[in-house]
Amino acid sequence: MDFTGRDTVAAGFDGVILIVREEIQNELMDHIGSFWPAEFPVVPVVQGAIAGTAQAVESARPFIDGPFGVANADDLYGAAALVTLADQLRDGTPGDHLLVGYHLRDTVLTDSPVTRGLCETDKDGFLARIVEQRMQRLSDGAFDGSPIAGPDAGRLQRLSGDEQVSMNLWGFAESILDELDSALDAFDPETAPHDEGKPPELLLPDVVGQIVSGGRARFRVVPSNSRCIGLTHPDDLPLVRSLIAEGIAG
């Protein structure tokens, strides 16, 4: 989160809206007060009652006025990707949304399985759909992937690593908030699928998929040549620390 905050300042964003759990809000804000630039506004917002990234983004509505970016706090996107996002929000077509895509190989640290959203685009570079897949790097540098849901669920396919994947680095026009409101109103936790022991979630990529399939908005996929580093497995931590120390993650 600290590195993304630093890169957000450098990229020219106006401030950060930090979606937090109420029980850790004070701890995080104390940390930010100690280590982030005092002149950079950070607004904490406690997420609403529905679990998932859709509700997280919608919770920020009172503090949003115009186009905005969305990033995970536990992924390290790289400074260049935040600059790309800021430039696209500033200079892109008004009303369009965007997704900063990464090459699959630039998002995987080890040979342990990960989940990634494989992006399919049309001939003009706009998002056609995102397919959540379980992926595993092979000894030759290629990947085995298999969709998690849908008619091809569990069917293995070989991936080169050049494919574009989503790491939840988004740029949105303000109109996305009305779409999120509608999706949240229609969400039924009683019937929503979920993993055992976890609450039903409404995820941002699922809402985006509904918007795209309904033709209600366009999402431009903007390639990034950065590396995106996330902590998927506990054993990743020493490697992530090493990459940061070497400057590879920045």
Image (tube, rainbow, N blue to C red):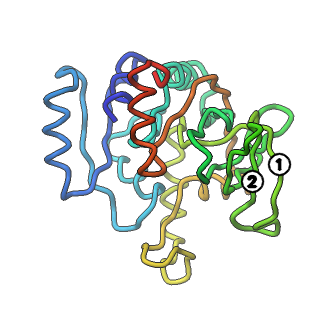
Percent across and percent down for residue 105 are: 67, 35
User: Total marks drawn?
Assistant: 2
What residue is shown with label 1? 158
Q: CA distance from mark 1 to mark 2?
A: 6 Å
Q: Are marks 1 and 2 in contact (CB under 8 Å)?
A: yes
- Which amino acid lies under the numbered mark 1 shown in the image of this protein? Arg
In this view, the residue in front, 236 or 173, is 236
Residue 27 image label:
none
Sequence-earlier tag: 1 or 2: 2
Judged left or right of residue 93, residue 125 is right
The correct choice, above or below, for 175 with respect to 250 in the image is: below
Judged left or right of residue 220, residue 207 is left
- Which amino acid lies under the numbered mark 2 shown in the image of this protein? Gly
> Residue 34: which quarter of the image?
top left
The correct choice, above or below, for 144 with respect to 182 in the image is: above
What residue is shown with label 2? 145
Question: For the point 62% across and 42% down, which residue is it?
Answer: 166
Mark 2: which secondary structure?
strand
| Residue found at the far right of this picture | 123
